[in-house]
Image (spheres, rainbow, N blue to C red):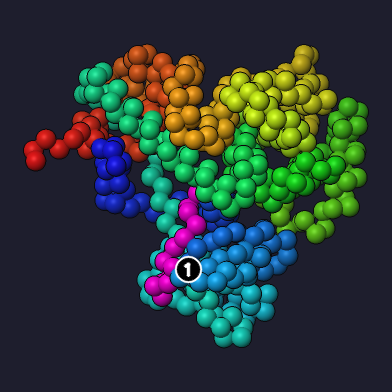
Amino acid sequence: MSNYELARSDLLLREAPSPRLSELEIQARLFAGEYGTSWKTTCGRMVEILSFGQWNREAGPDFKAARMAFDGGEEQSGDLEVDMDPRDWERHGHATNPAYDGVLLQLFVHPPPAAAFARTSAFRAVPQARLNPAEKPSCPLRHAPGAVGTPEALVMIEEAAEFRLRAKHAAHMRAISLHGPDTALFHAIAAGLGYKNNSIPFLLAAQRNGLRASAGPDGEARLFGLAGFLEPRTFDDAGPPTRDYLKPLWERWWALRDPLARLVVSKGLWKLSGIRPSNHPHRRMGALARVSSEFPALRSAIQSGGVTGFRAFFERLSHPYWTRHWNLSASRLDRDLALVGPDRIRDLLINAYLPSLPLDQARQSLCSLPGTTPAGLIRLASEWLVGSVDRSLMRSARQQQGLLQLHADFGSLTALEAWAKCRPNTST
């Protein structure tokens, strides 16, 4: 374990912040494999999830047909419920609802003040296990001019970048073990197209629809319908080009929506205002639909060209409607606009494709990528470390990833405090 990992672990253990994620975000991240696949139940048994199954379309537990094993025993198939508090089992009436009789495991986030138990309507005990999706609160960096010299800062950045790469790689490997390589990549691309503001609703739409359905003839209609973007008002207020685009989507979604209604993403999860036109969720969902329909071409491009093939696929990606529109209510653009721009392609490369590679290969590719114009968090991290925006600290994509990780992990500490935690202990 590197000095950076030790410092980070110590900080999380001491601060132990409570999660600020919603229950739906917990479920989406869990399904993606971000929280691991094995836990110890409150009764001391080990449970391993082999598959999270499918999102439940009907009333009842969150996931149906999950596969799991207790204490390394035989595989069992049943349902999975995820709650913020284990007491929600009783509060929400699951104990008397036969729809929950097939639940084999309840996962929860917040530990109760006293023991809580789950049972079915047939009085069968339901094992419970706690998730711990600890997330550091966002804190502004304290300005510490010159607190750390450039050589020391470079070491910190390198260790932080290596930690970030390994964490992304491990998360992607878990996703592959749960869903297979193609679906894992599809989910990662969906989250990346959502960017920081809409990554969870994009991930939910992709998870709930699945790669196979997204790539099928109804794929675009299903994605827009599950996203909640197909509304009567949108169609009624639209001009002729938008109506021509929406009409076949509406016709397909109308026949599908009743059994899928429970899976439609809530409007409250979307951020639609204050976003650049090229990044609007409507347009990004069009890009995801195009990626889905051309996924075999993406896989072929990766197999033949690796990083270059991945980038080339997205550079030539187009859509007959979304190349000239940025949302479902705006007028036609004066010129064609790249469906996925160069900055987003680069982010997808770093966050979706490179984590799928062997670590050595991913590390080499990341080091060879030049840094982009530094974003605000990268500039803040540099000012925090050395007292200024030092371009020598952010020349490569790997360095910029390290700065982002430092900001995420040590944003509430001064530079000297952070470096003291990361330095080797020379007193022993």
Residue 2 horizontal/vertical position (percent): 28, 38
Name the kind of residue labelled 1 in the image. Answer: Gly
Residue 285 horizontal/vertical position (percent): 71, 36
Q: Residue at x 25, y 37 (%)?
A: 3
Q: Is residue 44 magenta?
A: yes
Please count the marks in the image: 1
Front one among 166 and 114: 166
Residue 392 horizontal/vertical position (percent): 35, 14
Asked which secondary structure carries label 1, the reply is loop
Front one among 155 and 83: 155
Q: Residues within 10 Å of mark 1 (few under 14, many from 20)?
A: few
Is residue 410 in sight in this rendering? yes
Residue 144 horizontal/vertical position (percent): 24, 25
- Quarter holding the C terminus is top left
Query: Which residue, as the protein is rendered here, is positioned at the far front?
Result: 304
Q: Is residue 52 magenta?
A: no
Image height of 155 relative to 175, above or below: above
- Quarter holding the N terminus is top left
Front one among 333 and 86: 86
Front one among 361 and 413: 361
Main SS class of the magenta portion in the image = loop
> Which residue is identified by label 1?
72
Drawn side of residue 282 relative to residue 148, left or right: right
Drawn side of residue 372 relative to residue 301, left or right: left
Is residue 277 in sight in this rendering? no
Image height of 182 relative to 109, above or below: above
Image height of 207 relative to 276, above or below: below
Query: Which residue, as the protein is rendered here, is positioned at the far left?
Result: 427
Q: Residue at x 41, y 36 (%)?
A: 164
Q: Residue at x 28, y 26 (%)?
A: 155
Which quadrant holds residue 273?
top right
Magenta highlight range: 34-46
